[in-house]
Amino acid sequence: MRKPRITQEGATYHVVARANRREFILAEKAMKQVFVDTVSRARKKYRFAVTNICLMNNHFHLMITPAKGESISRVMQWILSVFARRFNLHHGYQGHVWYDRFKSKPIAGLRQFVATFAYICDNPVKAGMVERALEYAYGGCVLLRAGPERIVDPPAALVRLLFPSFAHRQIAAPRGVKVT
């Protein structure tokens, strides 16, 4: 029996979802872009802020803050199911793409926020994919700089202070969702 998901109004969550059989479903640049596009589409349908993201080959990490009245479960179910349909259509597959339901944990306090943010940034470095997080095209540091269609919200003052690589230029405040 599943444990109930822990949710808190106004919380920022660390979300992780793994591919079924740990397959490298996100290894192709095209599939990473499909995921980015799917999150971008979700932002037009649901209200939420993305503080950080990292797309690895067989999983992703996301720091997300649903707006008041939005459900983390509904947002993530939409993103995962839409991506799965597009992935299966692209490859001519049927069936499950994701291993299990996504994992989410509310981020409690400054220390956990900093640790989670740094962990997500450093994931491709620790995996040996790049030497520095700023070199990874599908990490938050780079996706923030993608311009008006970016999926990572402009960094809050705390993020700019603690992670200068996110603050290379002045960016407008987040779109109507308050991020801690």
Image (cartoon, rainbow, N blue to C red):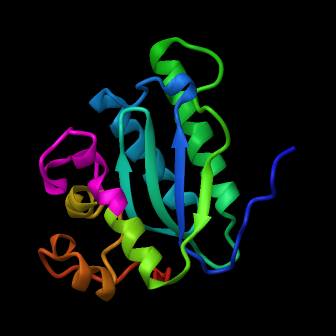
Tell me where residue 169 sits by quadrant: bottom left
- In the rendered structure, the answer to whether residue 107 lies left or right of residue 35 reads right
Q: What is the residue that sits farthest to the right in this orientation?
A: 1
Residue 151 appearing in the image: no
Residue 131: % across, % down: 12, 47
Residue 55: % across, % down: 36, 44
Which residue is located at x 81 percent, y 53 percent? 3
Tell me where residue 160 sits by quadrant: bottom left
- In the rendered structure, the answer to whether residue 108 lies left or right of residue 180 reads right
Of 45 and 180, nearer the camera is: 180
**Picture layout, residue 154 above or below residue 104:** below
Residue 116: % across, % down: 42, 66
Count of numbered labels shown in the rendering: 0
**Picture layout, residue 100 above or below residue 4:** above
Residue 2 in magenta stretch: no
Of 79 and 25, nearer the camera is: 25
**Picture layout, residue 145 above or below residue 180:** above
Query: Which residues fall within the magenta stretch?
Result: 119-139
Which residue is located at x 38 percent, y 56 percent? 53
Which residue is located at x 56 percent, y 46 percent? 79
Q: What is the residue that sits farthest to the top in this orientation?
A: 92
Of 26 and 5, nearer the camera is: 5
Q: Quadrant of the N terminus?
A: top right
Which residue is located at x 81 percent, y 58 percent? 4
Residue 127 in magenta stretch: yes
Residue 14: % across, % down: 51, 62
Residue 176 appearing in the image: yes
